[in-house]
């Protein structure tokens, strides 16, 4: 089951997450329950349980948008990717399906209200890889088709673009971060620290404590 989250309150996002992780039982940790799952549950304190599948899906979209916004705060990018003081922070969404469209709308709502490190947020939509332009975060809501993940890796190369997959396990197949559903319906996330480092990105230790960390997936060089 999914619940809504206070995605406009970034400090609360982190405070609750830390408290939730500290409160995770020893039994849960030994069972391999990632702290990121407790993180997602804790973020839902101001929400109500949706009563329909449609409401659950809409709430999940809000949750993912909140995660992506906070990734912009807890990953770091080289100064060189922001050549001007007014350079926006760009979040790209790839796809042309109902899920991609819904996620883009939620991100648009976040961009109207929030900033990342003092920069306005720009949301870009990509329905064709030929139209891709550089992003700071590139989100692929569905990477069930392996060619989409391959194309994302090819077009971003080793540039400082955080590739986030919406399909479980994609952080082990080339993405830098991936979301997944636990058996209880909550959402967790994996971070591949090796591919993140290869891109020249930094990640806060606070965020790593909330993630399932994976390693060792070589990233192909940019193609032609």
Image (cartoon, rainbow, N blue to C red):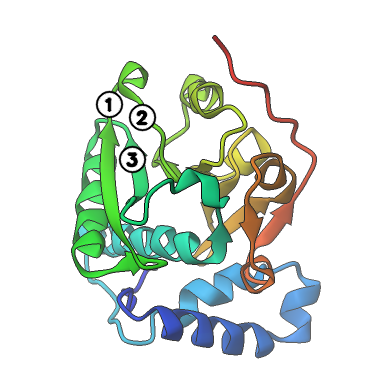
The front one of 205 and 29 is 205
Residue 37 vs residue 100, the one in the foreground: 100
Q: Which residue position is annotated with label 2?
A: 133
Alpha-carbon span between mark 2 and mark 1: 12 Å
Instruction: Give the x, y percent position of residue 132.
Output: 35, 26
Q: Which residue is situated farthest in the front direction here?
A: 84
- Mark 2 is surrounded, within 10 Å at the Cα level, by few (under 14), some (14 to 19) or many (20 or more) other residues, namely few
* Residue 213 point in image, percent of width and height: 72, 57
Q: Viewer-nearest of labels 2 and 1?
A: 2
Q: Which mark is residue 127?
A: 1
In the image, residue 112 lies at what x, y percent?
18, 63
Mark 3 falls on what kind of element? strand
**Quadrant of residue 62 within the rendered picture:** bottom left
What residue is pinned by disc 3? Answer: 93
Outermost top residue: 224
SS at mark 2 in the image: loop
């Amino acid at each position: 089951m999914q619940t809504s989250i206070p995605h406009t309150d970034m400090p609360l996002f982190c405070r609750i997450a830390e408290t939730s992780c500290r409160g995770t039982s020893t039994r849960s940790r030994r069972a391999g329950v990632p702290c990121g799952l407790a993180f997602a549950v804790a973020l839902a304190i101001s929400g109500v349980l949706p009563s329909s599948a449609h409401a659950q899906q809409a709430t999940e979209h809000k949750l993912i948008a909140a995660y992506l916004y906070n990734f912009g705060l807890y990953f770091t990018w080289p100064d060189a990717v922001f050549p001007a003081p007014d350079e926006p922070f760009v979040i790209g969404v790839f796809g042309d399906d109902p899920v991609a469209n819904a996620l883009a709308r939620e991100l648009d709502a976040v961009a109207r209200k929030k900033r990342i490190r003092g920069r306005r947020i720009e949301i870009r939509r990509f329905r064709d890889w030929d139209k891709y332009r550089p992003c700071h975060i590139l989100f692929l809501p569905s990477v069930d088709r392996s060619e989409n993940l391959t194309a994302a890796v090819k077009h971003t190369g080793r540039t400082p673009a955080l590739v986030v997959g919406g399909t479980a396990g994609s952080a082990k197949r080339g993405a830098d971060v991936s979301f997944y559903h636990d058996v209880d319906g909550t959402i967790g996330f994996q971070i591949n620290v090796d591919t993140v480092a290869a891109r020249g990105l930094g990640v806060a230790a606070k965020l790593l404590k909330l993630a399932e960390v994976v390693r060792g997936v070589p990233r192909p060089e940019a193609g032609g």
